[in-house]
Image (cartoon, grey):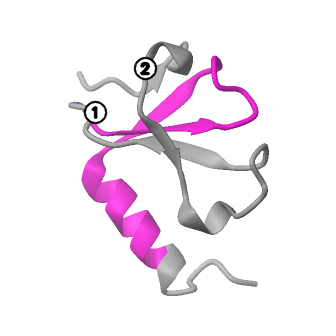
């Protein structure tokens, strides 16, 4: 069974923020590239909190939908 959460995301290094985050250093999500079971995502305000792990293909679809403006109101 694939891992869906990481209880303490702070135990992993290499997190990065989106280039769109700008100066909002404490209001971002961060992702970790190269994780073997998917794409971990965590809240930058809580670096030692949990991270959710999404299948890579699902994460790519989500990012593509964001870029296409599908979530704008």
Q: How crowded is mark 2: few (under 14 residues within 10 Å), some or many (20 or more)?
A: few
Residue drawn at (55%, 44%), measured in percent from left and top? Answer: 30
The tag on residue 35 is 1
Name the secondary structure under disc 2: loop
Give how far across and how far down residue 69 sits, in percent.
57, 86
Give me the residue at 33% from left, 43% from top: 33
For residue 18, side relative to residue 36 (left or right): right
Residue 16 placed where, x, y %?
A: 49, 45
Residue 66 lies left or right of residue 72; in this view the side is left
Q: In which quarter of the image is residue 14?
A: top left
Image quarter of residue 24 = bottom right
Residue position for label 2:
12
Taking the spot 40% from the left edge, 28% from the top edge, the residue there is 4
Q: In this view, does 70 lie to the left or right of 72?
A: left
The answer to whether mark 2 and mark 1 are in CB contact below 8 A is yes
Q: Give the range drawn in magenta.
A: 37-65
Above-or-below relation of 13 to 62? above
**Residue 34 included in the magenta stretch of the image:** no
Q: In which quarter of the image is the N terminus?
A: top left
Q: Nearer the viewer, residue 57 or 1?
A: 57
Would residue 64 be found to the left or right of residue 51 on screen?
left
Residue 6 screen position, x and y as percent: 47, 19
Q: Going 70% across and 64% down the picture, which residue do you hit?
A: 22
Q: How far apart are marks 2 and 1 (CA)?
A: 10 Å
Q: Does the magenta stretch include residue 63?
A: yes
Along the line of sight, which residue is nearer the eye, 38 or 16?
Answer: 16
């Amino acid at each position: 069974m694939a891992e869906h959460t990481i209880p303490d995301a702070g135990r992993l290094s290499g997190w990065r923020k989106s280039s769109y985050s700008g100066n909002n250093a404490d209001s971002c999500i961060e992702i970790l590239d190269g994780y073997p079971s998917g794409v971990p995502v965590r809240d930058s305000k809580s670096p030692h909190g949990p991270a959710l792990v999404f299948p890579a293909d699902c994460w790519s679809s989500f990012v593509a939908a964001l870029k296409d403006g599908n979530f704008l109101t």
